[in-house]
């Protein structure tokens, strides 16, 4: 039986619960100094004067680095403009300009963190202010299109939208908004930089160690071979650690000037602005349908804020382009510049916010038609991708609808708003469709068999807490025919074979095939050695007659003829046997549209007197190809659902309209759910065979769990109360 799919425990679990897992800031280097990032307190203008006399009086201060004394960067990178989307426009103390509140303006380095903090607090900075654009409504007065929406076109059009709207028996035209929201992983961004001559080592909390290596090298004007990035564990990323931000390069610059290793960890408040955010969006949905429920028109127009230094678009319309069959459709994306930090990827960017608007609008139109929301979606089920006119690589959405409705009890729903009550509370049932694209990038891996019969498998990937160590161990064990406990899977070192960013739910789909190929190549190499060795019980057989199991190679027709893999290595001179492999996507995306799908059913209870909303249960059913580990996979899907609840009911960074600073820039006032806010979450996965997405047949699951949940909750609240709230988060004041 294949080890792939089995719910084995996390291979890194003991290290994490015992505290031996070393995160970026945990590495102890000799003579380590501590840095504190100083950020602006104005949203626009310039630094006119810096007085560091008082700061330098603090004992132990080693360096006050500002735009006046920071190392000069090469001309091509001193502007801070690098290649997006992974490269961002950085603030690297090359100029005195300020573009948003909380932008880096100085770095203070001292022998202890306490001394560095005290010196940073004493640093006196004067500013010359300039007009700042901090109001989204005002910013919308001047819009511009992004160059691209990820790799897709900014706008799309098919059919005749106006004709479709005119032919509709029922239609809606509504605006939906989502707020400025922030990643808040348990581990804030952290970097330790150390130099040995011209060689730089970075211990960095990142989702992309190879990206950090390449971009830092390019920014500093040194060869990538002179940069080594180490990241064995990342304490959550969710998108914000997928790019290289200013503090990483600043730590390297400060270490160079200070002449000793420097540790720079962002304060929690500094997570709001300098390292990305989910932007404010305003989405207009226009839908029309014929009397039988078939969509005749679909339009999704997105406006999102971006910073004044860089364009970044929340791709809200991408799901609308492919999710339902509709002959007449338009989608657009526009940007409004504001003096806020640049937005970035945040768990299911575009799909989380876009499906909120789309799936809420679908419910509104179903209500106008007098149709059950589930039946309305089935009536518009897309048998192929209507935007790309390609067949699906696989699609199990009908099964997800059917199983989810049965597990939830959807048939017992009374469709009338305010019709269901329990214990004096209004009860509402809502549902929505979940979807996320299946992506894949090139990756490489190495597998090595040791004389003791254990194997080491390496790739320069990263584990964000999602279970990469565990899943890749399973993949290697399956290909090698070795028990998982005898495999040591290693990642988090840029000197290992290259791997892509852990974002866009790509890691398993990208790295898994490379690990499998390298492990399979190693198994075949061991077989070849044994078959050619007269001392081996397998001598003289052919490779296609040999199987591997539990660390043994054996003759299929005569299992007694067998040899342990470690013995083969020992007799081969005792030198480890090694194999490497590359894996990359081919032309499959030109033949198939690749997405994961799911159905989300939600129950809410609403205290009408207090406006308090509770979510006692959620049922989510997903088609995600081949599930690599039932335990870690279900955990990922549940985590996504919890974030969907947070998106719908809790999360919002509140900006001070006077200065553009988050007034709730901390974990006490930036609200996210706690255990008491989460009820029953029932997750299941349908069996789905997809031979096209990648050799393992696996679709990413890190992000699909959040999609659809926001709309399902909004739809359930409408059912419970009769009120349609189109602006997230749905807080009690919007229901009173």
Image (tube, rainbow, N blue to C red):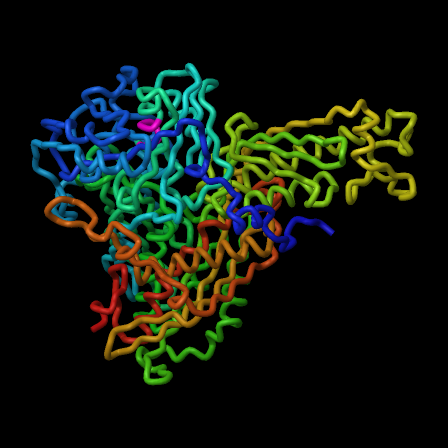
**Quarter of the image holding residue 247?**
top left
Q: Taking 454 as reference, is 703 left or right?
A: left
Q: Taking 17 as reference, is 126 left or right?
A: left
**Quarter of the image holding residue 274?**
top left
Count of marks, rendered view = 0
Q: Using the image as rendered, state which of residue 290 and residue 623 is in the foreground.
A: 623
51 falls in the magenta region: no
Question: Majority secondary structure of the magenta segment?
Answer: helix
Residue lying at 38% horizontally and 64% vertically, measured from the top left: 712
Q: Using the image as rendered, state which of residue 525 and residue 439 is in the foreground.
A: 525
Q: Using the image as rendered, state which of residue 294 and residue 117 is in the foreground.
A: 117
Residue lying at 29% horizontally and 66% vertically, measured from the top left: 170
Quadrant where the C terminus is found in the figure: bottom left
Residue 296 at least partly seen: no
Q: Taking 710 as reference, is 599 left or right?
A: right
Query: Measured from the top left, where is residue 616 in percent x and y?
Result: 41, 72
- Establish if 110 lies above or below 476: above
Query: Measured from the top left, where is residue 557 in percent x and y?
Result: 90, 43
Residue 51 at least partly seen: yes
Query: Measured from the top left, where is residue 729 in percent x and y?
Result: 27, 60
Q: Residue furthest front?
A: 59
Please provide the residue range marked out in magenta.
247-251
Query: Measured from the top left, where is residue 713 in percent x and y?
Result: 35, 66
């Amino acid at each position: 039986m294949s080890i792939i799919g089995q719910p084995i425990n996390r291979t890194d679990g003991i290290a994490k619960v015992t505290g031996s897992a070393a995160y970026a800031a945990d590495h102890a280097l000799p003579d380590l100094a501590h840095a504190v990032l100083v950020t602006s307190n104005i949203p626009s203008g310039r630094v006119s004067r810096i007085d560091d006399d008082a700061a330098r009086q603090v004992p132990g201060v080693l360096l006050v680095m500002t735009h006046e004394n920071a190392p000069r960067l090469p001309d091509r990178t001193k502007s801070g403009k690098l290649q997006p989307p992974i490269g961002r426009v950085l603030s690297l103390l090359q100029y005195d300009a300020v573009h948003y509140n909380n932008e880096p303006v100085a770095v203070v380095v001292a022998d202890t963190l306490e001394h560095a903090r005290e010196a940073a607090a004493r640093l006196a900075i004067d500013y010359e202010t300039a007009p700042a654009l901090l109001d989204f409504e005002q910013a919308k007065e001047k819009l511009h299109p992004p160059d691209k929406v990820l790799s897709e076109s900014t706008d799309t059009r098919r059919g005749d939208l106006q004709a479709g709207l005119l032919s509709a028996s029922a239609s809606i035209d509504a605006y939906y908004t989502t707020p400025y929201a922030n990643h808040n992983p348990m581990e804030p961004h952290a970097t330790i930089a150390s130099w040995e001559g011209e060689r730089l080592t970075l211990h960095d909390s990142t989702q992309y160690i190879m990206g950090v290596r390449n971009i830092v090298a390019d920014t500093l004007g040194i060869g990538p071979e002179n940069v080594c990035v180490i990241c064995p564990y990342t304490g959550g990323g969710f998108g914000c650690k997928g790019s290289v931000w200013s503090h990483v390069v600043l730590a390297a610059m400060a270490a160079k000037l200070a002449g000793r290793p420097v540790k720079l960890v962002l304060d929690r408040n500094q997570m709001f602005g300098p390292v990305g955010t989910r932007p404010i969006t305003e989405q207009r949905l226009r839908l029309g349908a014929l009397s039988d429920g078939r969509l005749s028109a679909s339009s999704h127009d997105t406006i999102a804020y971006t910073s004044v230094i860089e364009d970044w678009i929340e791709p809200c319309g991408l799901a609308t382009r492919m999710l339902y069959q509709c002959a007449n459709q338009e989608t657009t994306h526009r940007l409004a510049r504001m003096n806020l930090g640049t937005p970035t990827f945040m768990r299911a960017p575009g799909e989380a916010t876009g499906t909120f608007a789309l799936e809420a609008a679908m419910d509104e139109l179903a209500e106008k038609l007098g149709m059950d929301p589930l039946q309305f979606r089935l009536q518009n089920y897309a048998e192929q991708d209507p935007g790309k006119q390609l067949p699906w690589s696989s699609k199990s959405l009908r099964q997800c609808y059917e199983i989810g409705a049965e597990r939830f009890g959807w048939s017992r729903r009374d469709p009338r708003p305010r019709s269901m009550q329990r214990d004096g509370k209004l009860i509402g049932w809502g549902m929505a469709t979940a979807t996320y694209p299946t992506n894949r990038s090139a990756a490489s891996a190495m597998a090595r068999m040791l004389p003791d019969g254990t194997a080491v498998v390496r790739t320069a990937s990263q584990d964000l807490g999602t279970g990469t160590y565990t899943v890749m161990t399973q993949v290697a064990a399956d290909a090698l025919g070795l028990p998982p406990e005898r495999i040591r899977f290693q990642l988090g070192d840029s000197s290992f074979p290259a791997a892509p960013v852990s974002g866009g739910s790509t890691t398993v789909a990208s790295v898994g095939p490379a690990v499998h190929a390298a492990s399979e190549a190693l198994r075949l190499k061991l077989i070849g050695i044994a078959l050619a060795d007269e001392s081996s019980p397998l001598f003289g057989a052919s490779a296609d007659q040999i199987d591997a199991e539990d660390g043994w190679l054996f003759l299929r027709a005569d299992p007694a003829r067998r040899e342990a893999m470690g013995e083969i290595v020992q007799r081969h001179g005792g030198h480890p046997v090694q194999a490497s492999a590359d894996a990359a996507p081919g032309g499959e995306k030109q033949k198939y549209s690749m997405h994961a799908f799911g159905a989300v059913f939600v129950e809410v209870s609403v205290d009408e007197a207090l406006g308090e909303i509770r979510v006692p249960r959620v049922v989510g059913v997903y088609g995600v190809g081949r599930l690599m580990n039932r335990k870690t996979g279900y955990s990922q899907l549940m985590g996504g659902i919890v974030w969907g609840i947070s998106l719908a009911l809790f999360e919002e960074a509140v900006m001070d309209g006077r200065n553009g600073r988050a007034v709730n820039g901390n974990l006490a006032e930036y609200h996210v759910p706690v255990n008491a806010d989460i009820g029953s979450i029932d997750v299941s996965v349908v069996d789905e065979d997809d031979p096209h997405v990648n050799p393992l047949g696996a679709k990413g699951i890190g992000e699909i769990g959040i999609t659809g949940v926001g709309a399902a909750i909004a739809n359930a609240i409408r059912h419970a109360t009769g009120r349609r709230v189109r602006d997230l988060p749905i807080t009690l004041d919007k229901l009173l």
